[in-house]
Amino acid sequence: MLQENNAGGLWRETFRQFEDIKANGPSSVGSDLCLHGFSHVYGLPEHADGLQLKDTRASEPYRLYNLDVFAYELFSRLGLYGSVPLLVAHKPDRTLGLFWLNASETFVNVYYSPSDQQGDQSPLLKKRRKQPQTDVRWLSESGVIDCTVLLGPGPKHLFSQYAQLTGYQALPPLFSLGYHQSRWNYKNEADVKAVDAGFDLHDIPYDVIWLDIEHTDGKRYFTWDPALFPDPAGLQRHLEKKKRKLVVISDPHIKVDPDWSLYCEAKDGGHFVKSREGQIYRGSCWPGESCYLDFSNPDTRAWYSRCYSLDKYKGSTASLFIWNDMNEPSVFDGPEQTMPKDAVHHGGWEHRELHNLYGFHQHMATFEGLLTRSGGSERPFVLSRSFYAGSQRFGAVWTGDNVASWEYLKISVPMLLSLSVAGIGFCGADVGGFVKDPEPELLVRWYQAAALQPFFRGHSTIVSKRREPWLFGEEVTSAIRTVIEQRYCLLPYWYTLFHQAHTAGLPPLRPLWVEFPSEEITFTVDKQYMIGEALLACPVTGPGVKEIRVLLPGSGEVWYDVHSAEAFKGGSNVVLPVTLDTVPVFQRGGSVVCRSAGSGSCAADFQWLPLSITVALNSQGEAEGELYLDDGHSFSYRDRKAFSLRRFTMLSGRLLCRPASKEGTFDCDTVVQSVTFFGLKRKPSTVIVRVSAGAGDTAAAFQFTETCCTLTVNNLNLRVTADWEIQIG
């Protein structure tokens, strides 16, 4: 309801008990764009919906307005925790993007036009073919029209263009690609140490344990509960001895407490958002009455970043990392549980103008705080619930308060694909569901799916039952251990994919159409996906499944089951029997994938293990792949070119290991222990290893399995940073 206030010349809008006074009067900006020839569009996260955007003609538009939504509704177009106003359109010969740079509340309507001319039923005339098109209508409450059209022409060109515009994915520290164990809340230091010891006792690797809001002193962030966590630095040192890390939560609301120095410092420094009357805005959140930091102010961001310094953040060490939650921002007693639109930020900007940037700016300030803490030498890790275009520069995001049900497991796949298409490559969903308690089968299937996604964290609410992986019986423990170990063995490949995201804007997780852009059958697939160019994953997301249908695209392609090495022709659907232990993953013919060979308790253990390389031959007997190496934690790769990028090329029966970049000074003792070739048509008579700087040729022992045409060469001990080749004769 809009009405004019004649006394003040202001406009008012009422929503339930809330009143929004529009100091500058009502406004909106919009634009209609017609995408000729397109009938598939994607993007616009975050929504709990399918990958392809739906026609909104007879229903709600897609809303971009960051909100704290507990146990969100599925197949909804209402706003969730983050917003990226990027729409991606794709057809066989072209991919293009529309980037609508506006941080105010935004609605997007999508209208697909049918490919057949409707109503032309004349028997004397051939039914005319109408060129398909998609009409996109943007409408934002405030701001200006700032729309960029990204012209591709291919999906990977578009990702590169978008990264040039909004920033590349931060290269994460290696540990953050391992498994994270979280709960609201681990009770105390003894509880944390017991869970940490439990992973060792059950031989399950993990890297990070997390503490939610109960670790603080009365929900005052940057503090520790003195009874429950009396020696936080000692706890971190205990974990660091095992090369593991601690993550703690830090929300944007600050408890109103005149006796708390941080509150007083923020108040005296003018670091809080103001009400429309010019007073400090107060709202309710976890601590009770709270004030909200104004991260739009560069001075506030700089002050907040300094709060993470080791001397200021008492009890913190260099192995402590951060989780920004509730930063939509969440205000329990606010309209739609967020900040009123007429609250006022630095420079006199109303909140309505900046709303979707609030969490982005906190994420930025936290990232800068951890960066500064190390003198600019160490890569930060920061997880944020709220995000905007460009948040990929600062770390990871997750899909928020999901539920322990099969439906939420299913929807996590298209949600993460939508984020990936929109540049947010380091993304994940809470394993097992945050809300309620998963049955054992659901928990196993969720671990299997999440181990094949970028950010891998188990998390649950305070009222849920404990769900550490060893609490459900040996069968479940064994299944979870297996997929977590497989995740760790695949870290060299994941890390290489994040190098590609960091340098070329390519998301690690990709819809099938990104790799098979001309195959229309892939355009609507969102139950399976590519991990980089080489691996296709199809997680089992239903209960009691005995078989699963998988689309293997590419009529000229060959696909290999990574577990059995069985070959399948592309351009077909295959039906596979599955058990509780089965995770359908296929390697694409023509690719090379590197894995760590061996075992360990965390990413640092796996980092220097010998490598096992899988060469999957295409129909021409060729393959190619890359491996990226650096120290896994610092910026030396950037500042001193301390990295190594290696390329493996299989051509004419010869596998070559050569540098893929003229740059790169990183050297290490990592060796290739074994190479397995999938799809070799006949048993070789000899396998010769030739090291470029070595002492001539060496005949290598090998095993050939005729049933699946697999050749394995073991005991190689070839340095991965050296040039060498393997000749199959």
Image (tube, helix red, strand yellow):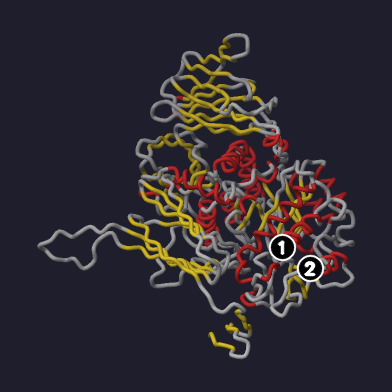
Q: Is residue 16 above or below residue 361?
A: below
Provide residue 501's location: percent of width, then percent of height.
57, 43
Query: In the picture provided, is 529 more to the left or to the right than 240?
Result: left
Quadrant of the rendered structure where residue 200 is?
top right
- What SS does tag 2 mark? loop
Provide residue 482's location: percent of width, then percent of height.
62, 43
Q: Is residue 582 visible?
A: no
| Mark 2 lies on residue | 270
**Cα distance between the residues tagged 1 and 2:** 10 Å
Q: Do the residues under discs 1 and 2 have CB atoms within 8 angstroms?
A: yes
Mark 1 is on which residue type?
Answer: Asn
Q: Is residue 563 above or below residue 716?
A: below
State the residue at coordinates (32%, 63%): 113
**How many labels sit on residues?**
2
- Report the front residue among 719 and 351: 351
Q: Is residue 692 above or below residue 544?
A: above
| Mark 1 lies on residue | 297
Q: Is residue 361 visible?
A: yes
State the residue at coordinates (47%, 47%): 158
Quadrant of the rendered structure where residue 299 is?
bottom right
- What SS does tag 1 mark? loop
Provide residue 578's location: percent of width, then percent of height.
49, 47
- Looking at this rendering, what residue extends furthest in the left direction? 124
Mark 1 neighbour class, 10 Å CA radius: few under 14, some 14 to 19, many 20 or more: some
Mark 2 is on which residue type?
Answer: Gly
Mark 2 neighbour class, 10 Å CA radius: few under 14, some 14 to 19, many 20 or more: some
State the residue at coordinates (74%, 46%): 199
